[in-house]
Image (spheres, rainbow, N blue to C red):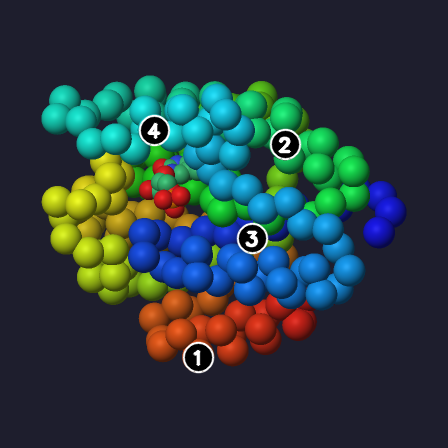
Amino acid sequence: MTGRGRFITVEGIEGAGKSTHIPVIRHFIEARGHRVVMTREPGGTAVGEHIRELLLEPREEGMEADTELLLMFAARAEHVGRVIRPALAAGCWVLCDRFTDATFAYQGGGRGIAAARIEALEDWVQGDLRPDLTLIFDISPATGMARIGPRGSRDRIEGEKVDFFERIRDAYLERAARHPERYRIIDGEADLATVQARLAGVLAGLY
Ligand code: TMP
C-alpha cells in the first residue's frame, strides 16, 4: 500500500488474552496485503526493554506512581521515535500490544494520577500520533487473575490486588464509551473459539 500505514493497539487487563489473539489480528491484516510491524509497550526498543525490566521486576519498596508514569512515557518516546513513526511513514501497519490507553487505565485509573497530567505527557511525547483503532479484550479481574496463575510468580504490576484491576477495567471501558469510533470492545470471558469468532466479526466489519 502507499501512504501512511495504520496504527492498531490491543489492550486489556492481565489475562485478557491479548497474546493469544494478536497473532490472529496480524494474520488478518497481512491477508489483506499490508506489511505489519508487531511491537509492544513498555518495550519495543533496546532502551524500552530495559525500562520494562525496571518497571516490572517485583520490588519490596514499591515505586512512586509518578516514577512509573514517567518511565512508561520515557519508553514510549523511544518507541514512537524509533519504531512506530518510521514504520507508519514506510506504509507498514503497526500492531502494538498496549499503548497510551494502558497508561490512562493503569496509572490513571489504577494509581489515581489525573488524566490531565497524562494528557500533557501524551501531547509532549506523541504530538498528534494516536492509534487509528484500539481493540480492548474485556474480562473480569477474577477471570484474569485465575488465568495468570499464582501470586508468587507475578510481576510487580500483576501482583496488585483485584480492586486495582477493577479500576483499570473501568477506565478502559470509560475511554471506549467516550470515543466509540476508535475503540472496539471484545468480550473475552468465553471459550477461545467463541472469542475468536467475535474477534473475526469485529475485524471483518472494519477493513
Ligand atoms: P504486558 O505484560 O501485557 O506486556 O504489560 C506489561 C504491564 O505494564 C502490564 O501490567 C500493564 C503495564 N502497563 C502500564 O501500567 N502502563 C502502560 O502505559 C503500559 C504500556 C503498560
Closer to the camera in the image, 35 or 202: 35
Which x, y percent locates residue 77? 55, 23
Amino acid carrying mark 3 in the image: Thr
Identify residue for label 3: 134
Amino acid carrying mark 2 in the image: Val
Residue at 40% x, 24% y: name it.
50
Q: CA distance from mark 2 to mark 4?
A: 19 Å
Residue situated in front as seen by the camera: 129 or 116: 129
Relative image position of residue 56 (x, y in whole percent):
30, 33
Q: Which image quadrant for residue 203? A: bottom right
Dot label at residue 53: 4
**Amino acid type of the residue that numbered disc 1 sits on in the rendered structure:** Thr
The quadrant of the rendering that contains the C terminus is bottom right
Question: Which of the marked residues, 3 or 2, is nearer the chain's N terminus?
Answer: 2
Q: Secondary structure at mark 4?
A: helix
Say what secondary structure mark 1 lies in: helix
Query: Cβ(mark 1) to ligand 1 < 8 Å?
Result: no
The residue that mark 2 highlights is: 83
Q: Which residue in the structure is indicated by mark 1?
A: 194
Tell me which label, 1 or 3, sits earlier in the chain: 3
Within-10-Å neighbours for mark 3: few <14, some 14–19, many 20+: many
Q: Position of residue 152 (x, y in %)?
A: 12, 45
Q: CA distance from mark 4 to mark 3?
A: 25 Å
Relative to 187, residue 95 above or below: above
Residue, x 63% and y 26% (percent of image)? 82
